[in-house]
Amino acid sequence: MKKIAIIGSGYTGIIAARELSLKYDVTVFESMDSIGGMTATFKTDGDKLENYYRHIFKSDSYVLGLMKEFGIEKEMLWPKTKMGYFTDGKIYEFGTPISLLKFKPLNLIDKFRFGLSILRLKTIKDYRKLENISAHEWLMKVAGKNAYEKIWEPLLISKFGNSYKDVSMTWMWGKIVLRGSSNEKDGESLGYLDGSYQVLTDYLEKDLKKRKVKINCGNKVDKVKKEDGKYTIVASKKKYKDFDFVVSTVAYPYFQDFANPFLTKKEKHNLSLIKYTGAKVMILFMKKSFMPFYWLNNGDKKIPFGGLIEHTNFIDKSKYNNENILYISNYMFHGDPLFKKNKEELFKIYLPMLKKINKEFSEKDVIRIELFTENYAQPIITKNYSKILPSLKIEKENIFNASMPQIYPEDRGLNYAIKLGYTVVKELEKFDKE
């Protein structure tokens, strides 16, 4: 039986390992202490909670399919959610046709053009029509200057910083078309797995072990060598030999650390063109609710964080010892001074900004703080992205590379990470038959 090494145990790696175990001897290498990647959770005084806020859409067939397979689809919760928008020192309800009509920062013509831009985007079936135009250009033209500067521009800046004008409209298309599946007249119904997505991860881990997949957590891959036509994985100073294939599911900078000797000049160049933003996500456990919304987008460019997500306006706080849980999402580049701040330093910076949004908020309401950092949280999808997107298999080796930037044209997320796992398996099996 041929041997396969899978590097990274996010959901792409988990699904790839699971499917390949039917025909191959599979070993998974994971630098963290547990599997799951960005679906990782931590303990609270109640249910476990994701390090990074998590929900799914009604169209997420791959996630829902897995849950059905394990018999846990009935554990899905589908509460109605409300979205808000902060601008000009005020919070407005946002996200429904009625809330748009009541949105005072835009006049009637601006509202009409904003709504029309959403509708027009939803009618576009072929994303390739949008590849050669930036979101900045398209939205400015279709939604109009006022709607763009008041709504779209702050959202792009919060996600991509100074690179926001480089982002392809294809990325925005993926966001809007995907999210539209959960929209209803009175808000969104988003999904959450009762008990956290750790429940699904645990089922998958048990299934991997049942399929005799070897899981090596706490083993960071430092090097991949080729010896006598086979691959040797060097992880945590230990050698694992005789692999016929290697499947990497980690971010490109990590992939290049160990795969560079095997890449062609063109492959190295294309990988260098793909950039990421990092992210720091702070979680506040509080005595009081911060806002009446599940999700509040920030339109104030002087406030560095992009979104506030009050998890307990989504899932009842009784599951978390009656504490109110607020995620503060902040995408940023590694050179940003905030990227190096610890949770105490960052909270001091955030505090006056949180008070600006909610004047009644007090640091005395905060019970404790958690902070999680992801170095490569969001690839920057630039114009004509498909022309530089690396193929799943590198040119001259039995090494495959399936990670977040290849979730295209859809936006990254749990559902499409699962889909990518199935896709790389098909590609590997196709090549193995040739």
Image (tube, grey):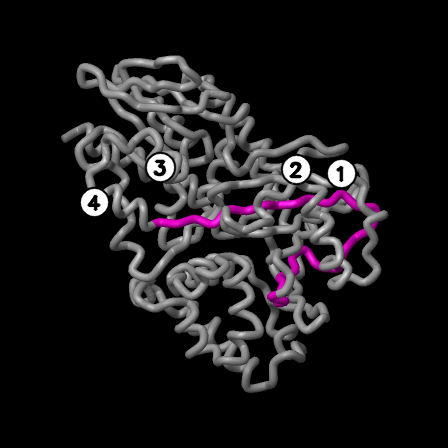
Using the image, determine if residue 99 lies above or below residue 250: below
Is residue 384 shown to the viewer in this render? yes
Give x and y (percent) for residue 79. Answer: 66, 52
Residue 150's disc number: none
Using the image, determine if residue 321 lies above or below residue 301: above
In space, the residues marked 2 and 4 are separated at their CA atoms by: 42 Å
Q: Mark 1 points at which residue?
A: 320
Quick one: label 2 or label 3, which is nearer the N terminus?
A: 2
Is residue 126 shown to the viewer in this render? no
- Point out the frontmost of discs 2 and 3: 2
- Point out the frontmost of discs 3 and 1: 1
Quick one: label 3 or label 4, which is nearer the N terminus?
A: 4
Residue 49's disc number: 2
Disc 3 marks a residue whose amino acid type is Tyr
Quick one: label 3 or label 1, which is nearer the N terminus?
A: 1
Q: Mark 3 points at which residue?
A: 422
Q: In the image, which residues are magenta?
A: 274-301
Disc 4 marks a residue whose amino acid type is Lys
Quadrant hosting residue 396: top left
Q: Is residue 126 left or right of residue 18?
A: left
Disc 2 marks a residue whose amino acid type is Leu
